[in-house]
Image (cartoon, rainbow, N blue to C red):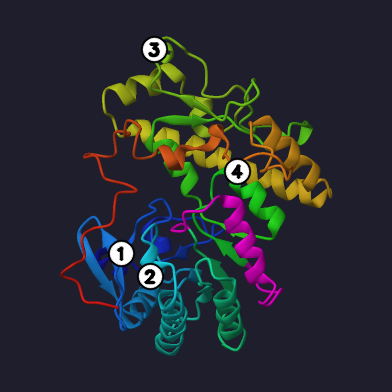
Amino acid sequence: MPACTKLHGGLRSFVALNKAEILILDTLDPVVAVRTAKATSKAMGIDSEGGIRRLTPEAFAHSVDLLQPDIAIPPADYIEEPLPSLTHGKRISKSVSRSKKWLNEFLALKKSRVAVFAPVVGSRSTELREICAQGLLACDGISGYSFNDVCLQVPFAEKLDLFRHSITHLDVNKPRYMQGSSAPDLVVRAILYGVDIFDSSYAYAVTEQGFASLYYFRHDSETSGACMDNSSGSGRLDMWDSRMFDDFGPLVDGCSCYTCRNHHRSYIHHLLKTKEMLATVLLQIHNTFCYQQFFVDIRRSMDANTFPKDARRFLERYGCSASELGLSGAADQPSQAFDELDMLSKQIFSPTTKIQRKRNAEPHNMGNESGL
């Protein structure tokens, strides 16, 4: 962090992010499921690649003032699963009270005028989620709400039900941000439940595995330049595949991104095989463009008042289960077309990853850490 804090303009200037993009500063990586260590009354425990780090509201407020994001999500006492002792009884109640305490401390300490999205906690307890929501309603200085239930090991449909229960007790005029649900099929389902903002880690997950996105939301005259595949149920193209060796076509026919206009599949396949960093640069350009176009088409669908119908067609096109479509008689199985986030720790890593990192690993032995 010291390097980027020396540049005028904060983190946005450091990474040369377009002003039209929203920059969100969060405490946790939405790509990784197991991310927290045991918290204390004063600090949140973060399981980073450099070991356990303790983050206090004061330290986070200082970071926010230096990095100047558009939205900041204060530390919260998130509960990891599957350990049963962490999801029952007083542990959830302590999580709610501790998160409220940290939020108030952060609001009192921050100096910048950044928008604050308050974490909504409560794990699986609807009663404690109501208590959390009531506390947030009485809190000044909140611009929106953050829902981070990545750690809950329940089907996505149940997470959406918990989300719906929480928002009935919150200010309906404030935006709602959901982490860990950036896969296109999950985005579509979450929008139908009232989620407004998503993280963009899905495009990164696709790139990290050497894939090129092929999906599209709408197939009509308004989607010129979009990433449209030619076969139902295919959401990605595996650029490691040996068939790419002598394929001199663009990643996606008709795509107007820089990569598809200037390079072909064979070249990117070669870059991957030779461990060139340019491979992931070009793939990230394409995958980010495709992801952005996906949301452009969603907004057009909403403007045309056809989103529910378009959403159903999208989910059907990419093989989503009956439960995802709101039908009965089927288990909540995610679409295999968009499972890159789940596959991240199992696939061949792209060249920018120098060493294989453990993602979704088992929690560390915290026997020597301080207790709750």
Circle 4 or circle 3, nearest the eye: 4
Residue type indicated by callout 4: Asp
Q: Secondary structure under badge 2?
A: helix
Residue 274 in the figure: left or right of residue 290: left
**Between marks 4 and 2 in the image, the one whose residue lies nearer the viewer:** 4
Residue type at the position of mark 3: Phe
Identify the mark nearer the N-term, 4 or 3.
Answer: 3
Residue type (three-letter) at the residue carrying disc 1: Cys
| Vertical order, 99 against 283 (above or below) | below
Question: In front: 365, or 256?
Answer: 365
Q: Residue at x 46, y 38 (%)?
A: 340
Task: Look at mark 3 in the image and give the residue it sits on.
Answer: 245
Q: Do residues under tags 4 and 3 come within 8 Å of each other at their CB atoms?
A: no
Give me the C-alpha separation between circle 1 and circle 3.
40 Å
Q: Are marks 4 and 1 in contact (CB under 8 Å)?
A: no
> Residue 306 is drawn in which quadrant?
top right
> Residue beneath label 1, please?
4
Category of crowding for the residue at label 3, using alpha-carbon neighbours closer than 10 angstroms: few (below 14), some (14–19), many (at least 20): some
Label 1 crowd bin: few (<14), some (14–19), many (20+), radius 10 Å: some
Q: Which residue is mark 4?
A: 332
The kind of secondary structure element at disc 4 is loop
Q: Nearer the viewer, residue 163 or 208?
A: 163
- Residue 313 at x, y percent in the picture: 74, 35
Point 30% across, 49% down: residue:
361
Where is mark 2, residue-wise? 67
Mark 3 residue element: loop
- Classify 131 as above or below 330: below
Disc 1, disc 3: CB below 8 Å? no
